Every structure is written in C-alpha cells, then in structure tokens.
Image (spheres, rainbow, N blue to C red):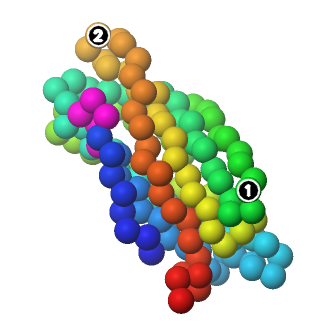
Amino acid sequence: MAVPVQQVTDGISITVECFYQEKQSNPVSGEYLFAYRVTIENFSTMPVKLLRRHWHIYDSNGSYREVEGEGVVGLQPVIEPGNSYQYVSACSLRTDMGKMSGSYKMENLYNKKAMIVQIPEFQLIAPFKMN
C-alpha cells in the first residue's frame, strides 16, 4: 500500500490511496491491477459538483495514456461545504510500476463558475518491487 497523497485546490482537498490487486493481476501476462481510493473534502464555503475527470497514466515502460470523461464511477456528486465524498476505482498497467495524476472539473453551485481541481500524482507500485 502506498502512502496517501493530498493536494488542496481552492478549498477542495483530494487525497488518494493506492492498493495493488494481487489476485486480479497476472504478472506473467504483463497485467497489473491497482485500485485507488479518492477522498474529496470540501473545505470551501460553497457547494461544488464534480462534472468531469481527466487522468494522466504512465507505465514504467514509457507508455502514456489519458482517460477523460463525465463524473466518477458513473456519478456527478455534489459535495456540500464541510462534507466529503469517497470512491474507489482501478487502473490496469502493463508494468509493475507506474504513476497517475490528473484533475477534476467542478462547478461552484453558488455562482455556476467552473473550477479545475488538481489530483496529486501518486505511485502505482507492486509490493514485490519494494524489496
């Protein structure tokens, strides 16, 4: 398990924890699955709605891909001031190490202005690489 990483943008805190999924991975075939838990905390004074996500995913073999789309895990949650939202998702890699970072497009529900909230970079590392 990786150490959680956190970043705050405009009062919105994003914390990410990553977990290697050994039972769903197949290193012989170059298939490595990592789950990650994202906690979004609203420390601002206005409710926000998460509209879109944009991920940058890097394998240690130099490959790069982007994932962009509406919401997270099929939802566009509204996060009231002082509240948080948490979800779990996953990412597959072709190597036993990689990294991810990205951003969320959110909307301030008071003034309808869009805001970009940064997702901190986090490492995807199979535990056997740590020895």
* Residue interval drawn in magenta: 9-13
Against 105, residue 84 (above or below) is below
**Amino acid type, label 2:** Asn
Is 102 left or right of 33, judged from the image as shown? left
Q: Answer whether residue 92 is visible to the viewer in this image.
A: no
Q: Residue furthest bottom?
A: 131
Could you say which quadrant of the image residue 124 lies in? Answer: bottom right
Q: Provide residue 39's location: percent of width, then percent of height.
A: 35, 51
**Amino acid type, label 1:** Gly
Front position among marks 1 and 2: 1
Whether the magenta-drawn stretch holds residue 43 is answered as no
> In terms of secondary structure, where does tag 2 sit?
loop
**Which residue: 68% across, 63% down?**
60
What residue does disc 2 label?
A: 111
Could you say which quadrant of the image residue 56 lies in? Answer: top right
Type of secondary structure dominating the magenta stretch: strand
Crowdedness near tag 1: few (<14), some (14–19) or many (≥20) residues, C-alpha within 10 Å = few
What residue does disc 1 label?
A: 62
**Which residue: 59% across, 81% down?**
129
The mark nearer the N terminus, 1 or 2, is 1
Is 102 left or right of 110, judged from the image as shown? right
Crowdedness near tag 2: few (<14), some (14–19) or many (≥20) residues, C-alpha within 10 Å = few
